[in-house]
């Protein structure tokens, strides 16, 4: 299954390489953590946009709390996880009402799937080299379905808030969980040279 998803993702990225790419960046907030998104999009039809999305997804523990050490003056997190993920999703966005709404917004449905690199560090130490020096890695896959709206701006740029659900199985237990499924809220700022 993983090989099929990787093959489809790479095939999509190669087949749409001739069109002009719009780049995007933005924050994301998920049930299991927070992160930052980087994306590229190609419009292949008036109502279909394909592309890719990668992000740095810092996984938080359900019982993680911020703390302060009065003796050293340092802020720290108590009960945090040393786990982050870097998904590389191929994306397909469908704009069902494109050209039917006479305004600058366009609702969409988006499907994302692809491989994920999970890096699991040592939670028991605060020193960077000890925490991440011999971190274990896991290759898995993920799928996300999202609903959102493109708010078109002058010059072809767009602001695209969306909410969705993602399925992130680990294949084994990682930091007490076998999956990191949950709701995800994205806000992507896309920069482009022309208005759709």
Image (cartoon, rainbow, N blue to C red):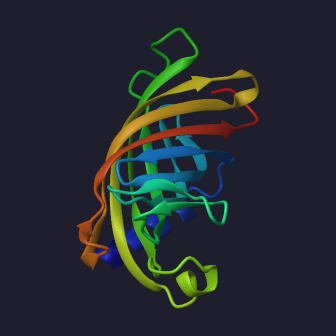
Residue 8: quarter of image = bottom left
Say above or below: 20 vs 80. above
Q: Position of residue 34 (x, y in %)?
A: 48, 51
Question: Does the rendering let one see residue 90?
Answer: yes
Count of numbered tags: 0
Q: Position of residue 84 (x, y in %)?
A: 47, 68
Q: Position of residue 181 (x, y in %)?
A: 28, 56
Say above or below: 166 vs 127. above
Residue at image position (73%, 31%) is 194
Residue 143: quarter of image = bottom left
Residue at image position (51%, 80%) is 125
Say above or below: 161 vs 133. above
Q: Quadrant of the C terminus?
A: top right
Q: Position of residue 159 (x, y in %)?
A: 60, 30
Q: Nearer the viewer, residue 140 or 157?
A: 140
Query: Which residue sits furthest bottom?
Result: 134
């Amino acid at each position: 299954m993983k090989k099929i998803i990787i093959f489809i993702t790479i095939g999509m990225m190669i087949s749409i390489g001739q069109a002009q790419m719009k780049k995007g960046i933005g924050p994301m907030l998920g049930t299991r953590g927070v992160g930052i998104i980087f994306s590229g999009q190609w419009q292949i039809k008036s109502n279909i946009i394909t592309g890719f999305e990668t992000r740095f997804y810092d996984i938080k523990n359900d019982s993680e709390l911020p703390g302060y050490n009065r003796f050293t003056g340092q802020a720290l997190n108590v009960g945090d996880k040393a786990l982050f993920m870097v998904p590389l999703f191929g994306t397909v966005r469908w704009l069902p009402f494109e050209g039917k709404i006479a305004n600058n917004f366009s609702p969409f449905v988006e499907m994302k799937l692809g491989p994920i690199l999970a890096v699991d560090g040592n939670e028991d130490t605060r020193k960077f080299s000890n925490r991440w020096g011999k971190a274990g890695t896991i290759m898995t896959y993920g799928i996300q379905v999202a609903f959102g709206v493109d708010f078109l701006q002058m010059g072809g740029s767009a602001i695209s808030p969306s909410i969705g659900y993602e399925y992130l199985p680990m294949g084994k237990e990682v930091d007490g969980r076998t999956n990191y499924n949950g709701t995800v809220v994205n806000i992507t700022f896309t920069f482009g040279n022309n208005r759709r």
